[in-house]
Every structure is written in C-alpha cells, then in structure tokens.
Amino acid sequence: MSKRRKKSNNFIITIIVFIFLCVSGYFGTDYFLDTSNNIAKEASANEVQITTSASIENADEVDLNNDKLNIIFFYVGQADCTLIKLNDEVMLIDSGNNSDGKNVVSFLQEKGITQIDYLVGTHADEDHIGGIDDVIKSMEIGTFLIPTVGKNGTDYKNAVEAAEEKNIPIEHPTMGEVFIFEDAHFEIMSAMEEEGTSDNNSSLVIELTYNNTKYLFMGDAETEVENSRSWNKVNVLKVGHHGSNSSSSTKFLEQVKPQYSIIEVGKNNSYNLPSDKAIKRLEESGTQILRTDKANGDEVGSFWLTSDGNTIDIRKVNINLDGNG
Ligand SMILES: [Zn+2]
C-alpha cells in the first residue's frame, strides 16, 4: 500500500506553464478577455449522462469487482458513511455512529475489502467518527485523515488511540492538498482550523475528480465554509450537514450546480432534517435529490454509484447499516 501524494505546488508549475503558453499565443486572443472564467470552466466537471434505476433492491447485487469508480452512500441512520472504490484502492469517508461501526466493518468484509487506503474522519462529531475505531481495529489502514478541531472529544480520542495503537499515519490535511487515488485524485477544499471553528465547519471537504466527473463531499460544513472560497461545478454533491438549513446556500449551489444531490439522513430523526428550506434551495438549483431516509419510497436505503469517468449510473440498494435499526 504505497502512499502517493501530489503536493499542491503543482499549481505553481501549472501557472508557469500557463503564462508561457499565453506569451507564446497558444490560447489565442479570446482567452485573454476572460481568463479567470475560462480557468474556472477548465477546472469544472462536464455535464455527463446520468442514469438511475430502481431495479436493484438487493444488497447482494452490489458488485464492487469492476474497473469503474464505485461510490456507496450508506444509510447509517442519522449519520454519514460513504465508501469510494476504484480498482484496488479504497477510501472511506466517515463511518456512522458508534453503534454503526460493526455493521460498516461487516459490509466491507463481505465485499472482500480488508484494506482502506484513505480513511477520512471529516470532523469530530459522533455521527461521523463514532464507528471509526471499529474500522481502524478491523482493517488495514493506509492513512487516517482527520482535522485537529475537536481533539478533546471522546470519539476523537478513541479514533486516534486506535490508529496510534496500530502505528497508522495520522494526517491533518490543509486546504489545497491533493491526493492521488488510483486514476482519480481528490483535493481538500476546506479544512478550517482557526480558533473558534465549530466541529461542523472544521469538516474536511473533499472534491474527487475522475476523468470528466467530479464529486463533492461536504461533511457537515455549513454556510461559513461555503462562503469561504469559490467552488467548481460538480456532477454529484454529498449534501452538507444532512440537509440542514445551515448548509446548501443558494450562492454555493449556483457555483456547484450538482446534477445529483445525495442527503445521508436518518428516518424520522429528532432534528427534523432535512430542512424544508434547504430542500427548496436544492430543488430550485435544478438538482435531483436522493435521500437515504427515503431511498425507496418511504423505505430507507443506500445509493450505489458507478462511473467510467464519462457517464454516471446511480442505483438504489437495500443496504441498511444503522446499528439502531
Ligand atoms: Zn453530522
């Protein structure tokens, strides 16, 4: 399990090459008229064909042994857990509450997954890292990524202790860091750690790029994070903070313009999430909303996405990893 990382100083090389190409007239005159806009377009996802189907109702039919990008947005009750697999490389973003960790491990083992190259705890809250110590104890882990905010919390301590016991490298990535993931790569779009940053806003926000497709995983990041930078257009958005009104602002959605928006949220949760207001803003943005609490009519479930980098296929799957349900 070799660790391959591309530092963000590639950006400086890109700028130097860009200036050289501009000077040499490579882009023609039009490019000079609106360069910032063109750069933004270059970095954004293309509109790709997305197909969805209700045909798969059985978890047994999730077959991860293919050469496509596979993403599973799991139902873990009122919590987050997302698996990403491309060939032999695996990333897990969050792992549900404490009660869900064992279910997450069982699912991975059933699918023959024994190693996770990148394990991401987006932030210190239990509904994201509660189950992560179970994952660390049961799996071979390449690198464990977690912010520094919230380090005195019980779940944070349990997770870090479990990683330290197995000598797993723990990293606190910063905004702009890029990691190679098989033929894809992912960039840390936000990692706030200023004094006073809330757990939610310390979320490691991850943008995954695979050929012509882009995916944005927001953790529980809220409007403060959304307003802190500019965003690329993506094909699929893992909606921030379970569809809370404090995330998914109109200004943010106007930039991200997701074709699909997936909300990982617990059925009849006590927070009344997702909020009607957030749903309205998402609907107004033109995105199609998929909710794990209502994956199949009123039934909970997960979503399985596959992509060859040019098209995306999303299906519902009857997977429930909620330890309380
Ligand atoms: Zn959460």
Image (cartoon, grey):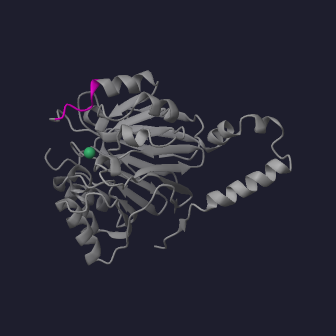
Above or below for 217 versus 278: below
Residue drawn at the location 16% of the way across and 50% of the way down: 323
User: Is 99 on the left or on the right of 137, as rendered?
Assistant: left
Q: Is residue 212 something one can see in this rendering?
A: yes
Give the image location of residue 239, x and y in percent.
37, 38
Give the image location of residue 8, x and y in percent.
57, 60
Q: Residue furthest right?
A: 24
Number of on-image labels: 0
Can residue 324 be found in the magenta stretch?
no
Above or below for 315 versus 60: above
Q: Quadrant of ligand 1?
A: top left
Give the quadrant of the C terminus.
top left
The front one of 20 and 81 is 20
Give the image location of residue 151, x and y in percent.
25, 62
Quadrant location of residue 220?
top left
Q: Is residue 134 something one can see in this rendering?
A: no
User: Is 273 on the left or on the right of 145, as rendered?
Assistant: left
Above or below for 269 versus 182: above
Give the image location of residue 4, x and y in percent.
52, 69
Residue drawn at the location 28% of the way across and 54% of the way down: 95
Quadrant location of residue 270?
top left
Magenta stretch prevailing secondary structure: loop
Residue drawn at the location 57% of the way across and 46% of the way down: 309
Q: Which residues are magenta?
A: 271-276
User: Is 263 on the left or on the right of 37, as rendered?
Assistant: left
Q: Residue furthest front?
A: 195
